[in-house]
Structures are given as C-alpha cells and as structure tokens.
Image (cartoon, rainbow, N blue to C red):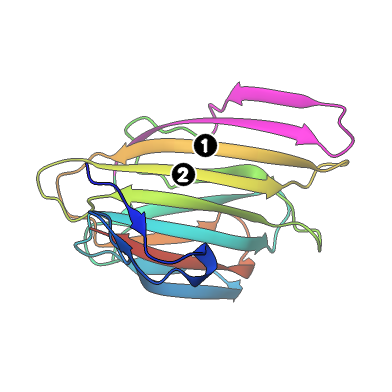
Amino acid sequence: MSLIKLKNNALDNLTSFEGSASLGDMVFISSATASSSASIEFDLGSYKEYKFFFVSIHPQTDQSNFLFNFSTDNGSNYNVTKTSTAFNAFHRENGATTIFSYSTANDLAQSTADQICLGGDAGNQNDSAFSGMLQVFNPSSTTYVKHYINRINATTYHDPPYSVDTYVAGYANTTSALTNIKFQFDSGNIDDGKILMFGLN
C-alpha cells in the first residue's frame, strides 16, 4: 500500500496528491428534483457500484412508505425478486423514548414487491423530510446476484416527532443485468427533494 502525500500546505487549496489513490473515482451521472412527482427513475449501466443520495425528500402524504424496485427489461416491469433485512433506531425530540429494533415490516423474503427503504415514518409536515443513501453493487453482472445497502434518517410524523435511522440491506436474486431503478412512495407523490446518482468503478 502506498502512502498518500499531500502536495499543498492546506487542505482547502488541495489540487492533487501522490500515491495509488486518485481523484475522480466517483463519477456524477445524473440527478432528479422532485416536484409533486409520482416516481423517479434512473437507468443503470456498467459501473461496479452506484450510489444514490436522497436530499431532503418531502412526501405529499403523511405516514407513507418510500420504496424502490429494479427492472431487468429497460423499465417495462419493476418486479425483481429480492431478499433483505432491516432494522432501525429512533429518538424523540423530547427525549422521552428511544428504540432500537429489527423491522419485520421492511424486510423481504424472495419477494418481487417494492423494497421499503423508509417504512411508514415519513411525515408531510412543512418542516419534515428525510435524507440518506442507497448503494447498488455490480448491477450489470450476468453471473452474480446484486447486493444493495440503504440508510436513511427521517423526521417523522409522530407527535412529538422523532429522528428515525433506518438500515436496509439485501440482494436482487437474479443473474440478469439490472437495467433500471425506480423510487416512489406507496401513497401520494414525491412532493419535493432531490436524488443524485453517482457511479464507481
């Protein structure tokens, strides 16, 4: 393993560095800004990993589930078989309640249903939103299943509200290449927010 040597005196002036690491391994591909959108879809390609960043996603409907699913036929169908696991932690604004638990409502067992990545906790109050990230690994493989890891933090609809930190991980159980991914709520539109897509090789 080579050592990385910074070539500038201060990090805010950093333009390059020596060593085996390189700038630009993560490539910005696309973004979509919701405006009362029913769903947001992205094409998947040949990058070894994709990262999706959710920025201040605001639901139209209170207590709705935020979902995603994959397609293997260029978006004609979103029904890929998936198996996953899920858990979450939360803490109320008033400090009264804390919970850490497995989430049976969010996991899948060989199901073609949409994967819940935030389940029933999204609040549509003016100051409520959620942010987070989804990683999808090697979706173009025609040899292996396709793994994914998801983490979201949300301000919930409860009174008093709480911060809920949700973790979901699983795999699309197919050796067909994944061609597309779609995000949506199970009730109402994506009222506001942005999703950014990056690729890594």
Q: Amino acid at mark 1?
A: Tyr
Residue located at (74% from left, 52% from top):
123
Q: Secondary structure at mark 2?
A: strand
Q: Amino acid at mark 2?
A: Asn
Mark 2 and mark 1 residues within 8 Å of each other at the beta carbon:
yes
Q: To which quarter of the image does residue 7 belong?
A: bottom left
Residue 170 vertical placement versus 198 (above, below): above
- Which sits in the foreground, 53 or 111? 53
Residue 188 location, x and y as percent? 63, 62
Q: CA distance from mark 2 to mark 1?
A: 6 Å
Indicate the quadrant containing the N terminus: top left, top right, bottom left or bottom right: top left
Question: What span is colored magenta in the figure?
Answer: 81-105
Query: Which of disc 1 and disc 2 is earlier in sequence?
Result: 2
Give left or right: position of 89 versus 95: left
Q: Is residue 98 magenta?
A: yes
Q: Which residue is mark 1?
A: 167
Neighbor class of circle 1 (other Cα within 10 Å; few <14, some 14-19, many 20+) is: many
Query: Which of the 4 quarters of the picture holds residue 18?
Result: bottom left
Q: Is residue 39 visible?
A: no
- Label 2 crowd (10 A; few <14 / some 14-19 / many >=20): many
